[in-house]
């Protein structure tokens, strides 16, 4: 591996995918002149699994919040593709962010409840979403009765129930132990295969980003910006044996080097 | 299944010494939590009785427990209607405090400016002793009942207001974002997120307010000082004092204390029932 490695924006199979959204020279400056993001360009295609990888303060979460329309760019634009003007967004946070007073089923119901649909009318969809994360027997349980991994799976079920055009995940597994993290990594890929939605996944972990994504956007801090983009050519479905393969190690090394450079640039 | 200790190290269920001690300690704690106060109560009553008897204190100075008990029975015709009046005022004041406190705190969370403008005055109302305000209230308000109600409300509403306001603002930030992403209306956010999140805080405020409403009702009646039909336990104490009927004073006083404890217990129970499924404070600790 060397620095001359040609890392193009997207390899052929990726390039064939239709465009979902485009971030054009986005900058976000918070009050007191904190530049969270400067000149960020990113094209997201339908079906991409993109990881935003970088040190803290590189604007990964800011980028997610911009896409989710929770904050607005200081300069630049986010263009959604014409066919996606009715796009639906789901977010999974680092914490499961469940309502403790509501059962698992009611938590998953939330997006539909806010769309004024009754529990009964969407019960099938709730159960289907719970089945996808293997929690179909926990509809009536309260979040406090669940383990950390199960809470996170509930949170994922809630995000999936709307069949979102894009799922934004902000370090969702960072607080879990390694066994659970590996399992959820695996499950997440399976889910993505089944549903085929687009995912933007924020992470600190090189290993996680290589295992999960087909594109890794390495970001640098101060000011937050895109340092480099890598493509992981390994086809899906990826099994756990990918974790121990030589390709995996090579990708991890490339990604680590890119991350090191990104951090070296930060002064 | 038989339990044989001699030959096998693989007996059925082996409970070690430490666990047995822990279980025993838990049992002792459970019994002790009601037994100890009961013992103190019995000792205190006995001591009270002995002091009266040994020192030959006349009953118009300090009646013994036996006399107070018989006063409950003899004066029940007087005590019971007074208790009903006091309870009516207490619960009406509590109801108005809940409606006013929750209503105002919802208003506060809808508009920061309303909160900024009004909250300091709520504090002023709270920190001014009700005994100092009460005489003025009774000058301006004709109806005695309404005057009492206002006094009790002034004392009781603040804990509901401040706790509920805190609770409404304590909803998880990520959940708020999620509600925004799913396009929740103001009303949906209030109904499905903020009000449930505020419930434990509100119930904490309610428990305090219950006791304060009783105190407000009693204090206001002391200030109002007028008797006649429809007077409560406070006036019973005042009147018994004028007549040097110390026994009845004790009976009324004990009745007030018991009422306060009952109110607190009932509100705690309600709180437990509402929160038992999800809130840490009401969930039984699993080891």
Image: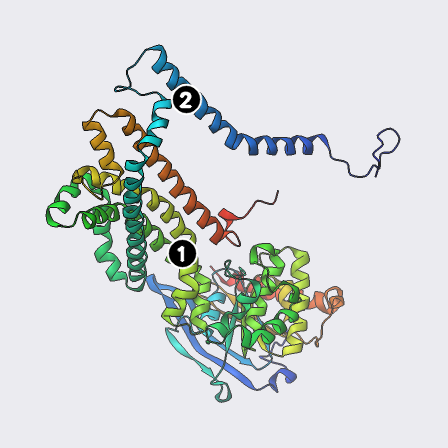
Label 1, label 2: how far apart the Cα atoms are: 41 Å
Q: Chain of mark 2?
A: B
In front of the other: label 1 or label 2? 2
Residue located 59% across and 30% down the image = B28
Q: Is A100 situated above or below A29? A: above
Crowding near pointer 2: few (<14 within 10 Å), some, many (20+)?
A: few
Mark 1 lies on a secondary structure that is helix
- The tag on residue A195 is none
- The tag on residue B44 is 2
**Res B208 → quadrant:** top left
Instruction: Give A163 or A173, whichever is nearer the viewer.
Output: A163
**Res B85 → quadrant:** top left
Q: Is residue A162 visible?
A: no
- The tag on residue B198 is 1
Instruction: Give A172 or A136, whichever is nearer the viewer.
Output: A136
**Residue lying at the far bottom of the rendered structure:** A82
Dot 1 or dot 2, earlier in sequence: 2
Quarter of the picture containing the N terminus of chain B is top right
User: In the displayed structure, does residue B213 sit left or right of residue B268?
Assistant: left
Q: Is B219 situated above or below A26? A: above
Residue located 40% across and 56% down the image = B198
> Residues at badges 1 and 2 in contact (C-beta under 8 Å)?
no
Mark 2 lies on a secondary structure that is helix
Q: Is residue A243 visible?
A: yes
Q: Is B36 situated above or below B204? A: above
Can you give x and y, in whole percent of width and height, for residue B78 in the image? 28, 36
Quarter of the picture containing the C terminus of chain B is top right
Instruction: Give A167 or B197, whichever is nearer the viewer.
Output: B197
Can you give x and y, in whole percent of width and height, for residue A44 in the image? 54, 79
Q: Are marks 1 and 2 on the same chain?
A: yes
């Amino acid at each position: 591996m060397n620095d001359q490695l040609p890392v193009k924006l997207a390899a052929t199979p990726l390039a064939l995918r239709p465009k979902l959204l485009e971030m054009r020279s986005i900058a976000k400056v918070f009050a007191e002149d904190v530049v969270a993001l400067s000149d960020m360009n990113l094209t997201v295609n339908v079906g991409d699994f993109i990881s935003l990888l970088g040190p803290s303060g590189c604007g990964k979460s800011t980028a997610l919040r911009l896409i989710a329309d929770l904050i607005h760019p200081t300069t630049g634009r986010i263009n959604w593709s014409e066919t996606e003007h009715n796009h639906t967004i789901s977010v999974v946070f680092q914490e499961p962010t469940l309502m403790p007073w509501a059962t698992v089923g009611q938590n998953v119901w939330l997006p539909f409840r806010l769309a004024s649909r009754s529990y009964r009318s969407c019960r099938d969809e709730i159960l289907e979403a719970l089945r996808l994360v293997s929690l179909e027997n926990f509809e009536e349980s309260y979040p406090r009765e669940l383990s950390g991994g199960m809470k996170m799976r509930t949170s994922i079920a809630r995000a999936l129930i709307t069949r979102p055009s894009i799922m934004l995940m902000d370090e969702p597994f960072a607080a879990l132990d390694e066994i659970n993290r590996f399992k959820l990594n695996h499950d997440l890929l399976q889910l993505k295969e089944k549903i085929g939605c687009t995912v933007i996944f924020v992470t600190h972990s090189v290993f996680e980003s290589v295992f999960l994504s087909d594109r890794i956007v390495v970001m640098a801090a101060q000011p937050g910006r895109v340092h480099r983009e890598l493509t992981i050519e390994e086809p899906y479905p990826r099994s756990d044996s990918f974790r121990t393969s030589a390709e995996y190690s090579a990708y991890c090394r490339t990604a680590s080097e890119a991350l090191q450079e990104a951090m070296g640039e930060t002064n | 299944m038989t339990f044989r200790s001699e030959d096998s190290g693989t007996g059925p269920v082996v409970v070690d010494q430490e666990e047995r001690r822990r279980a025993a300690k838990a049992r002792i704690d459970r019994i002790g939590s009601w037994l100890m106060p009961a013992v103190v109560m019995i000792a205190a009553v006995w001591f009270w009785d002995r002091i009266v008897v040994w020192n030959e204190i006349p009953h118009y100075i300090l009646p013994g427990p036996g006399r107070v008990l018989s006063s409950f029975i003899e004066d029940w015709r007087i005590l019971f209607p007074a208790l009903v009046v006091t309870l009516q005022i207490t619960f009406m004041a509590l109801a108005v405090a809940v409606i006013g406190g929750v209503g105002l705190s919802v208003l506060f969370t809808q508009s920061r400016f309303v909160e900024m403008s009004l909250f300091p005055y709520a504090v002023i109302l709270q920190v001014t002793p009700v005994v100092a305000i009460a005489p003025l209230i009774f000058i301006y308000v004709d109806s005695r009942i309404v005057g009492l109600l206002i006094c009790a409300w002034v004392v009781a509403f603040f804990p509901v207001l401040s706790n509920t306001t805190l609770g409404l603002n304590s909803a998880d930030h990520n959940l708020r974002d999620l509600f925004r992403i799913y396009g929740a209306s103001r009303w949906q956010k209030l109904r499905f997120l903020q009000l449930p999140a505020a419930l434990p805080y509100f119930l904490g405020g309610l428990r305090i307010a219950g006791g304060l409403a009783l105190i407000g009702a009693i204090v206001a009646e002391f200030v109002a000082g007028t008797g006649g039909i429809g007077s409560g336990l406070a006036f019973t104490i005042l009147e018994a004092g004028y007549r040097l009927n110390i026994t009845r004073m004790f009976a009324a006083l004990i009745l007030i204390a018991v009422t306060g404890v009952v109110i607190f217990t009932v509100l705690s129970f309600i709180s437990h029932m509402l929160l038992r499924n999800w809130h840490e404070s009401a969930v039984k600790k699993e080891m």
